Structure formats: structure tokens, C-alpha cells
Amino acid sequence: MIYRKYIKRMLDFLFAIILLIITSPIMLLAAIAIKIEDPKGPILFKQKRPGKNAKIFTVYKFRTMRVETEKNGKKLSDMERLTKIGSFLRKTSIDELPQLFNVIKGEMSFIGPRPLLVDYLSLYSKEQMRRHEVMPGISGWAQVNGRNAISWEDKFKYDVWYVDHLSFLLDLKIFFMTVINILKQEGINSSNNETMPFFGNEKN
């Protein structure tokens, strides 16, 4: 309980500051590469997401897709919009680094259920909604057990399990599993899509 209420936040803030300093050259290079490949769009992707207790905040990521959504009157898929540098940023999880600012601001933790779309809030069951009882994370129990390669149902089960079992040792385990998954580039995309299918579509 002490770890959940006090120590976790202190560690998050401390390590976010340290990692921000260490990774700043990588973030600078990523920003430059994004603008060189697709100068029309912004460097950062910003989107409203629900955090702890479903409080809405703005999540930051490096932009990995082209701004254009259509070409010759045809709607482009996520795979068609994904840039070369964007694909690399996703595979290495460098696209997640701007979320260090979310951690510093107290909107996210390093470990916790991933913050999903605001539109999903009305679709959750009462049990699935429990994923918002803790701070959302850059990585989480669902991510190290399949990330986008698992179904929504399994993902939510992992999220709620994490809420009920949150501890320092579990967070440490997830941290090391995350590092291993990044190095092995496992579970980054769902089996048939560059991003997960919309929750409502799968549910229906």
C-alpha cells in the first residue's frame, strides 16, 4: 500500500528525469528524422486519453504516420500511412519516449495499463473499467504478455489483474520483461494490423 500510494510516484518522477537527460540526444535525432521524411506534419502526436479515475489528459508520442489520410480519393490504411522512420520508432519503442513528460507531470507511470481512447470509456464493462483505478503506464502487464498481438478481452484481463496485484516486485518484473521485448521486437503490432483494431469493432 505504501509503495502504491507514495513510493511508486517518487520513483517514476526520479527515473523520468534521469531518462529524459539520457535519451534527449535520441529524441532530438528522432524529431529531425520525422521532419525530414514528412515535413508537412508535426513532430509529436498528441491525443486525449483517460488516466487514473478516467481523468482526461493529453498523451505525447512521436508521430509515426503521414498526415494525409487519403490518396487519389482512396482512404489510406494505417500500414500505408506509416512512415519508414515511424516503423523504426515503433519497433524500437522510441516513439514512446515523449511520454516521459507525461510521467513527470504525474499523468502517467512507467508501469500500468496503457491509456486507451476516450471513445472506449462508454464501451467498458464495470470490471474492465477497473483498469482506471491506477495510473496508466508506458508499459504494462498486458504489453509484456503480447502487447498488440493479443485480443482486447485478454488485454483487459491482464490490466485488471495488474490493478489487483500491483507491487514493487511486479513493476520490476514488467520493466525487465519490457526491455527484453523491445530488444526482441515482440508483440509490437497485432497479427493483421499495424495498430490494434478499434475496440468497438472487435466487440461487435
Image (cartoon, grey):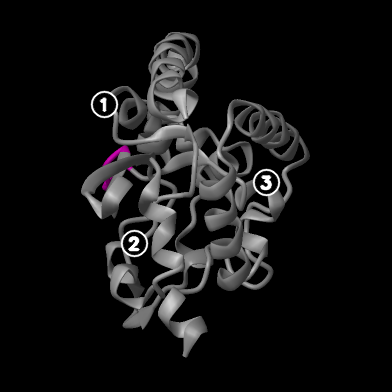
Asked whether 46 falls inside the magenta stretch, the response is no
Residue 87, image x, y percentages: 57, 48
Location of residue 179 with respect to 131 vertically, above or below: above
Label ID, residue 105: 1
The mark nearer the N terminus, 3 or 2, is 2
Please, what secondary structure does the residue beneath circle 3 have? Answer: helix
Image quadrant of residue 14? top left
Give the residue displayed 39% in from the left and 51% down from the top. Answer: 115
Q: Work out whether residue 20 can be spotted.
A: yes
Q: Nearer the viewer, residue 56 or 168?
A: 168
Amino acid marked by disc 1: Lys
Marker count (numbered) = 3
Circles 1 and 3, Cβ within 8 Å, touching? The answer is: no
> Label 3 amino acid?
Val
Name the secondary structure under disc 2. loop
Magenta stretch: give its range. Answer: 39-43
Q: How far apart are labels 3 and 2 at the CA level?
A: 20 Å
**Counting other residues with Cα less than 10 Å from the Cα at mark 3, is it few (<14), some (14-19), or many (20 or more)?**
many
Rendered position, 126 above or below 184: below
The residue closer to the viewer here, 20 or 6, is 6
Distance CA(mark 1)–CA(mark 3): 25 Å
Q: Indicate the position of residue 162 as horizontal and vertical percent values.
A: 57, 48
Disc 3: which residue: 144
The extreme front residue here reads 1
**Residue name at image x 69 percent, y 56 percent:** 146
Residue 125, how many percent across, how many down?
41, 75
What mark, if any, has residue 95 been given in the picture? Answer: none
The CA span between labels 2 and 1 is 20 Å
Tags 2 and 1 touching, CB below 8 Å? no
